[in-house]
Image: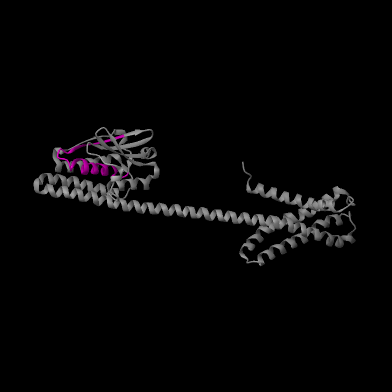
Amino acid sequence: MPASPHTRKALAVAGSVLAGALLPLGFFLLTARQPPSDGWGISFLICLSFSVAIAIPAWIVMPRVGRLHARLPMPWNWLLTIATMVLIAAGGSAVALAPWFLSGYYDAGFYWPSYVRSLRMAVFISLTIGLGAFTVELLRHKLNAAREEAERRRREAEEHRRLAAEAQLASLESRVHPHFLFNTLNTLAALIREDPAAAERLVERLAALLRFSLDASDVSLAPLRLELRLVEDYLEIERMRFGDRLRYEIDVPEELRDCPVPPMAVQTLVENAVKYAVAPRRDGGTIRVTGAVRDGTVELAVSDDGPGFEESALVKGHGLDLLQSRLAIQFGNRAALELRREGGSTVVVVLLPAVVAESR
């Protein structure tokens, strides 16, 4: 478990205090030929009092100086930092020596000579440790600022991609709806001349289709039962045109009909089947709509007994290509459009993620 910021700061202060006490002793050990006159124990306590009197004020004052450091230009920011460290070392040295002279351990007459002599070592050690720690904190602050900026830009980029995807999805849907409407109006125009009563029934179905189309423009998902009602209305409209040449069957389990699906997704597949498997053939064709859940994936399939086609035959910007784009924008790689050949039938399958199937 990583340490909290307060724990890390306490450890840093303790490390600075200990280092400030041991450095002068180490320097004395390397340069002197004999132990200090007061012995190693008293010398360590004196150095420790200096370290405490300097390190603690430094850890309180220097973060505030660091904020000024970030706003001042070079070289004034570093001059301010060094001057602050020198002042802290001078004040801390005076405080550290005071108890030793006030207690009578040392003669009070030697206070100032002792202060001047110890100040040089205190300033050297304070600048060595203090500027090192200050530089590390400054670099850490810049690193954290860079990470926050990168995270902000990442969130902005994600938001831009989301807005672009929504705009593209709206554009795609606006192109799907007129395409469907024009095909339906062509069917209506043919029926008005041949069978006015059938044309009247078709107008009623067309009104229902248009109502669904307008409602669908405001949502990204709609219950499958509404989509199947749209499909049935569309097939009945086309059946008025093709008669017995168009045969269809809808076989979707009742428990699957509340599954949310992209509006007009299944209708696009059915429209494509009518266009390529029924309309060009004298004997027409049979269209079958089925639904199932396999391995946590919803499969909505539209099959026909037409001549079939390859994925490379998809026309850019129309029908199935638009549906592929809509699925990619809404679900990424969690959804797909597959073309299969099963026996003598061409099958186009919409695969939706299970999370979509389970949502209400």
Measured as percent of width and height from the top left, residue 341 is found at 28, 36
Residue at 39%, 54% (x, y): give it: 164
Residue 122 appears left or right of 39: left
Q: Is residue 279 magenta?
A: yes
Q: Is residue 250 above or below residue 90?
A: above
Between residues 68 and 166, which one lies in front from this camera angle?
166
Q: How many marks?
A: 0
Question: Is residue 241 at least partly visible in the picture?
Answer: yes
Residue 58 image-quadrant placement? bottom right
Measured as percent of width and height from the top left, residue 74 is found at 64, 66
Quadrant that contains the N terminus: top right
Measured as percent of width and height from the top left, residue 104 is found at 89, 55
User: In the rendered view, how is the structure colored?
Assistant: one colour
Quadrant that contains the C terminus: top left
Residue at 35%, 41% (x, y): give it: 336
Between residues 177 and 4, which one lies in front from this camera angle?
177
Question: Is residue 263 at least partly visible in the picture?
Answer: no
Residue at 74%, 59% (x, y): give it: 127
Measured as percent of width and height from the top left, residue 51 is found at 77, 53
Q: Is residue 161 magenta?
A: no
Residue 4 appears left or right of 345: right
Between residues 355 and 29, which one lies in front from this camera angle?
29
Which residues, given as a range, are shown in magenta? 262-291
Residue at 25%, 47% (x, y): give it: 212
